[in-house]
Amino acid sequence: MTASRSTRADLVLHPVRMRILQAFLGGSAGRQLTARELAREMPDVPHATLYRHLKRLVDGGILTIVAERPVRGATQKVYALPLESAILDDADLATRSRQDLLRDFTTFLGVLLHDYAAYLARADVDPRRDGVIYRGFAVYADDEEFVRLQATVNTALLPFVGARPAPGRRRRLLTAIAMPAPEGPESDGTHAVEDMP
């Protein structure tokens, strides 16, 4: 069963389910994980909660079960995320009300905040060494120029998104947000937020 457009957005845009999908997207291309492996990456999520959300993602057609194997008298499922399942397209967004969109964005920010808090909870935090940045830019671009900007960024990221784990490589989370600036006085377009906390 595949979820309808609005149901699909509701499935994906939930704090725990977004973290589950992030686990699949954050590793090597085509990453496959068991519930036990996901639990190791999300130790703060109770196992019953994790299994419940996995079932919802499978029932909604977001995750697929690619293998089942017997383990100590039980069946262990191996899950995969077809990339197109996790990406909300224009048709998905068209079904969302303004209230839905604000809730979706708040959920997204909540997951981002959780990831940053988890980073800060580590014993060896050093934002400069770890390359932590958060920065905002205001740019002036017409629609065509902005499409070119997005294509340029996507082209630059593509070789790294498909990279596999290797010695010396650390998994890093990159987050992009783009939106029209609020109406107001003109600026020179050079607004930037501090690089570090």
Image (tube, rainbow, N blue to C red):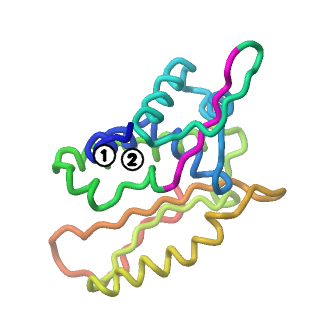
The quadrant of the image that shows the N terminus is top left
Position above or below: 107 against 83 = above
In the image, which residues are magenta?
74-83
Mark 2 in CB contact with mark 1 (< 8 angstroms): yes
Position above or below: 159 against 177 = below
The 10 Å Cα crowd at callout 1, few under 14, some 14 to 19, many 20 or more, is: some
On whether residue 45 falls in the magenta region, the answer is no
Q: In the picture, residue 120 is in which quadrant?
A: top right
Say which element carries label 1: helix
Q: Is residue 167 left or right of residue 115?
A: right
Q: In the picture, residue 138 is in which quadrant?
A: bottom left
On whether residue 79 falls in the magenta region, the answer is yes
Instruction: Say what amino acid the circle numbered 2 marks.
Output: Phe
Which of these two is toward me, 8 or 154?
A: 8
Q: In the picture, residue 38 is in which quadrant?
A: top right
Q: Residue at x 67, y 25 (%)?
A: 76
Q: Residue under circle 2?
A: 108
Q: Residue at x 45, y 50 (%)?
A: 86
